[in-house]
Amino acid sequence: MYKRLCLQSGILVTAKGTKHRGTDLWIGGSNAPTTTWVRTTNLVYAQAPLRIAYKFPVASQIDIFVNAGGYYALGIAGKVVWKGKTNREEIPDKTTKFDSFGDERESFSKTDAGLGFGVGATYRRFSLGLDYEQGLVDIGALKDAATTNHRSYKNYYFALVLGYRLK
């Protein structure tokens, strides 16, 4: 039984992100201008997963496995870029950039943690699997409590995982 039970861990570099699009209508007049905008968020983490896996042998040198556990991640890089274009020539287009994990009011928390599980198959030293992770930490709380804007961001992802086991 213990040969079928194993611990999976490592250090991963993961990239997560979003792209939001919207339109804002300016206040005033019957022909008020509008701004169309795109906000692209890129978050790069050094991540340490820790999972317990169980292998089910199905043929010679072929196993099916399931795993579950948690992860801790630390933000190491990333940018947030906001680009706005207004439908009036007298209002210039605007681009704003800042570090994803910087000190700006709208930047994100550097730490993330969550739960994950996966399924897959191994053949000799090679593995192929599907993973899902759900963040438990709100990484997007605004740093200025006086604002009326509230947001909540939690990371999650699906992944196709290719692996090679060292022996």
Image (cartoon, rainbow, N blue to C red):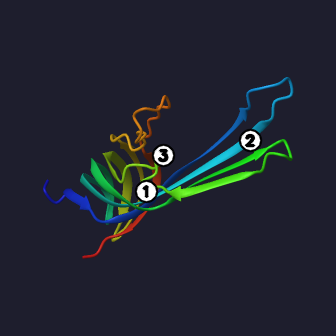
Pick the front one: 4 or 8: 8
The residue that disc 1 covers is 102
The residue that disc 2 covers is 36
**What is the three-letter code of the residue carrying label 3?**
Glu
Report crowding for label 2: few under 14, some 14 to 19, many 20 or more residues within 10 A (C-alpha).
some
Does residue 68 appear to the left or right of 84 in the view shown? left
Q: Is residue 158 above or below residue 141?
A: below
Residue 152, by quadrant, is top left
**What is the three-letter code of the residue carrying label 2?**
Thr
Q: Position of residue 148 (x, y in %)?
A: 49, 28
**What is the three-letter code of the residue carrying label 1?**
Gly
Identified at 78% across, 50% down, the residue is 92
- Disc 2 and disc 3: Cα gap in Å? 20 Å
Secondary element type, mark 1? loop
Q: Is residue 110 above or below residue 88?
A: below
> Which of the labelled discs sits on residue 118, or is there none?
none
Q: Position of residue 40 (x, y in %)?
A: 60, 51
| Badge 2 or badge 1: first in the primary sequence | 2
Q: Position of residue 87 (x, y in %)?
A: 83, 41
The residue that disc 3 covers is 106
- Disc 1 and disc 3: Cα gap in Å? 9 Å
